[in-house]
Image (cartoon, grey):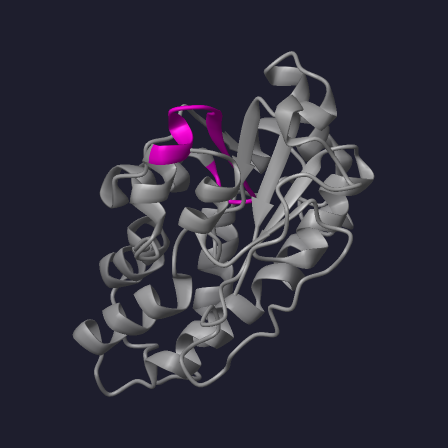
C-alpha cells in the first residue's frame, strides 16, 4: 500500500520544525502493557477488561477537572481515583497502599510500540521532538526513561494547566518554541486530538494503531482528508518526512 503524498492541500511539510507527539496509544501501547503487568501481578484478574475499564475512566475524570468539579489534578492522581473505584469490581480491594501505588505507576512503565524508538531516532535527526500529552511531567519523564524515548523536550498538560483539546495546549507548543503554529505538526493515533490541533493551525499526522484497544478489537484506521499526513506507523512517517 502506498502512503499519501507528504505534501497536500492541508499544509507544507517544509515548514515543520517541531513534531509534537500524543503518547498514550500513539507512542506507547497502554493496553498491552497494562494487560501484561496484570498477568504477572494478579493473574486471577482479566487484564484485558481491567485495562479497558481503567482507560474508560480517563476522559470522564478529566471532564470533572475541566468542568470545575475538581481543581487542577495531575493525571497520576486521576488514574489513582479511577483505580480506587475499579479495585472492588475486580476483586482487588484487599491490596495494601504500597501495592496500589505500585499498580498505579504502571502508567510510568508503559512499553513503546515496536517501531517507536527507531523511528523517533530517525525523526530526531531533522526535527525537534516533544511530547504533548495529558500525562503529567513526572509520568512522562519516567516512562520515557524506562522506554528509551529520545525526546528533546517533555511538554504536558501540566505545563499549560489545560488538557487537550484545549487550544492552550496546541498553541503552547508553538509559543514555547517561538514558531508559527503551522511549523508544529501533531502526531497522534486519535482523530479528535488531531482535529483540535488542526483548528489551532498546526499540521497533523495520523498514525495507524489498529491494536490500541487489544488484539481482538481492531480500530478503524482509514485515512481522513483533514489530516496532512497518514502513516501506517512511525517509521512510515519518518519515510514520508524524508528522515
Residue farthest toward the front in the current orientation of the protein? 2
Place of residue 111 in the rendered image (x, y in percent of width and height, measured from the top left): 30, 55
* 218 left or right, relative to 111: right
Number of numbered discs visible in the structure rendering: 0
In the image, is residue 55 above or below residue 53?
Answer: above
Quarter in which the C terminus is drawn: top left
Q: Nearer the viewer, residue 226 or 105?
A: 226
Place of residue 146 in the rendered image (x, y in percent of width and height, measured from the top left): 24, 43
Queried whether the magenta region covers residue 128, the answer comes back as yes
Residue farthest toward the top in the current orientation of the protein? 178
- Asked whether residue 143 is in view, the answer is no
Name the quadrant containing residue 97: bottom left
Name the quadrant containing residue 158: top right
Name the quadrant containing residue 29: bottom left
Q: Nearer the viewer, residue 95 or 76?
A: 76
In the image, is residue 49 above or below residue 196?
Answer: below
- Asked whether residue 96 is in view, the answer is yes
Queried whether the magenta region covers residue 225, the answer comes back as no
Question: Which residues are the magenta region?
Answer: 122-136
Q: Residue at x 55, y 59 (%)?
A: 2
Place of residue 72 in the rendered image (x, y in percent of width and height, measured from the top left): 63, 39
In the image, is residue 45 above or below residue 31?
Answer: below
Q: Residue at x 68, y 33 (%)?
A: 170
* 106 left or right, relative to 39: right
Place of residue 180 in the rendered image (x, y in percent of width and height, measured from the top left): 73, 18
Q: Residue at x 74, y 35 (%)?
A: 11
Residue farthest toward the left in the current orientation of the protein? 40
Q: Residue at x 68, y 38 (%)?
A: 7
Amino acid at each position: 500500500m502506498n502512503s499519501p503524498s507528504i505534501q497536500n492541500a492541508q499544509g507544507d511539510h517544509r515548514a515543520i520544525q517541531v513534531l509534537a507527539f500524543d503518547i498514550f496509544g500513539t507512542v506507547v501501547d497502554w493496553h498491552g502493557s497494562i494487560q501484561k503487568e496484570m498477568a504477572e501481578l494478579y493473574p486471577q484478574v482479566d487484564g484485558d477488561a481491567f485495562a479497558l475499564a481503567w482507560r474508560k475512566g480517563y476522559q470522564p475524570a478529566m471532564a470533572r477537572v475541566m468542568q470545575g468539579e475538581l481543581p487542577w489534578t495531575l493525571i497520576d492522581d486521576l488514574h489513582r481515583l479511577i483505580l480506587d473505584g475499579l479495585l472492588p469490581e475486580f476483586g482487588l480491594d484487599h491490596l495494601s497502599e504500597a501495592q496500589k501505588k505500585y499498580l498505579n505507576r504502571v502508567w510510568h512503565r508503559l512499553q513503546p510500540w515496536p517501531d517507536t524508538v527507531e523511528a523517533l531516532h530517525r525523526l530526531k535527526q531533522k526535527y525537534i521532538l516533544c511530547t504533548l500529552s495529558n500525562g503529567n511531567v513526572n509520568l512522562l519523564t519516567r516512562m520515557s526513561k524506562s522506554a528509551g524515548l529520545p525526546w528533546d523536550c517533555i511538554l504536558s498538560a501540566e505545563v499549560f494547566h489545560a488538557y487537550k483539546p484545549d487550544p492552550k495546549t496546541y498553541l503552547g507548543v508553538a509559543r514555547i518554541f517561538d514558531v508559527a503554529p503551522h511549523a508544529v505538526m501533531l502526531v497522534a493515533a486519535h482523530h479528535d486530538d488531531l482535529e483540535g490541533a488542526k483548528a489551532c493551525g498546526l499540521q497533523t499526522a495520523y498514525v495507524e494503531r489498529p491494536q490500541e484497544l487489544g488484539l481482538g478489537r481492531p480500530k478503524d484506521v482509514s485515512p481522513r482528508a483533514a489530516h496532512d499526513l497518514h502513516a501506517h506507523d512511525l517509521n512510515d512517517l519518518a519515510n514520508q518526512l524524508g528522515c
